[in-house]
Every structure is written in structure tokens, then in C-alpha cells.
Image (cartoon, grey):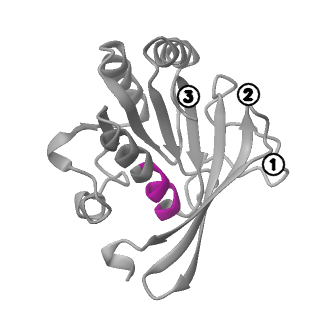
Amino acid sequence: MAAGRLVEVTGREDTAALTMAVRLILDAQRAGEQAAWIAPSEGLFFPPDLVANGVDLRALVVVCVPDGTAGARAADRLVRSGSFGAVVVDVGPVPRIPPPLLARLASLAQRHHTALVFLTQGGVPGHPGAPSVNTAHDGASSLGSLISLRVRARRQRIAAGRFRCWLEVLKDKRRGPTWRYDEVCRGAPGMR
């Protein structure tokens, strides 16, 4: 579904986006593919949550960067190697990635069949200049038109320590915004 594409996972519920990104990393590892997580120091990456959800941290490449643009440049180097099946880039609340860099990343992701996932925090209150979440679901991306798949991550507590997490497809250049993904998952240790 995400291989060879630029994917944007957005949402105010950071934990829902995190859950879906962790699922992608776990799926890549189970398929025997190399995976990477690129995060700013104030990002969503929290190793105990990944371990609690089955990710092998010893096999995960983790890159710390100062901001989203540096994260995209790091992704360029990783994807260019052709060694990664999945790369998650946390670009923070105000993503600013130059269009030429996004175009190069789209080409590299397609050439190397890599799922390149950008975590954005669309419409986070209190962040000046943050893009607002489009309630019309027209698929407008905070990263631009080169994003092939844009989804909004949501979560809902259904029991103590258990959540329903789902993706609302806002834009899908391959299939159209006609599908949805749901799963029930355990909450991160801090949420139980």
C-alpha cells in the first residue's frame, strides 16, 4: 500500500499517528526489510513504546535531526542507498520541506520501492503558522501535491489500555479516497 510512495500521516492525536507509523515499521521488519526512523529532538519517537509494540530496536536505524528539512535530507541519503523498505520522518508541527527535495524523494521512493512516511501534526493548536486540518477532506497536503497518499490518524479509547485506531484517507493518487483502515491496539505504557 505505501511502498514506492510519499505518504503523509497527519493528525492532532500524536499517539494515533505514532501507532500507525510503528505498525509500518513492524510490518517492514517482519518482512525482513530494513527500516529507519528520523526524528527531531522534540519529536514523537519514544523507544519504550516501539519495544512494547514489538519493534526490534537493535535492527532499527534511528537518526536525530534538528528539524523537518534536515529530516528530509537524511531521508534522501537513506532512501538513495536502496537498503530501506520503510523510512518514517517526523517533520513536526510546521513542516517546511523544499519542493525540489520532495520531488527527489518521490523519485527515490518509487525507484527503490521504499515507503517514505512523513508524520505531520496538522492543525496543532498553539503552534503559530501550523497548517489547519482541512475539515472538507479534500486531500490538501501540508507538504504539497507530491504526496501520493495522505491520511488522517485518529484514535478512540474503547477500554482500559485499549484503543481503536484508524486512518481516514484524504488523498490517494492510486486508489482514490475510498478506503479506510481500522485496528484495535494497546495503548502506549504511559496511556494505560
Disc 1 designates what residue? 137
SS of the residue under disc 1:
loop
Where is 84 relative to 92, above or below? above
Residue 81 is marked as none
**Disc on the earlier residue, 2 or 1:** 1
- Label 1 neighbourhood size at 10 Å, few (<14), some (14-19), many (20+)? some
For image coordinates 58% across by 60% down, the residue present is 12
Question: Which badge, 1 or 3, comes first in the chain's sequence?
Answer: 3
Q: Amino acid at mark 1?
A: His
Q: Would you say residue 20 sits in the magenta stretch?
A: yes
Dividing the image into 4 quarters, which one contains the N terminus? Answer: top right
Q: In the displayed structure, does residue 9 sit left or right of residue 191?
A: right
Q: Is residue 52 left or right of residue 140?
A: left
CA neighbours of label 2 inside 10 A, class few (<14), some (14 to 19), many (20+)? few
At which x and y percent is residue 114? 44, 25
The amino acid type found where label 2 is placed reads Lys
Image location (x, y in percent) of residue 186: 42, 73
Name the side, left or right, on which 188 lies relative to 103: left
Q: What secondary structure is found at the residue carrying circle 2?
A: loop
Above or below residue 113? Residue 7 is below
User: Which image quarter is the C terminus in?
Assistant: bottom left
The residue to which callout 3 is attached is 6
What residue span does the magenta drawing correspond to?
15-21
Query: Majority secondary structure of the magenta segment?
Result: helix
Q: Read off the residue under disc 2.
A: 173
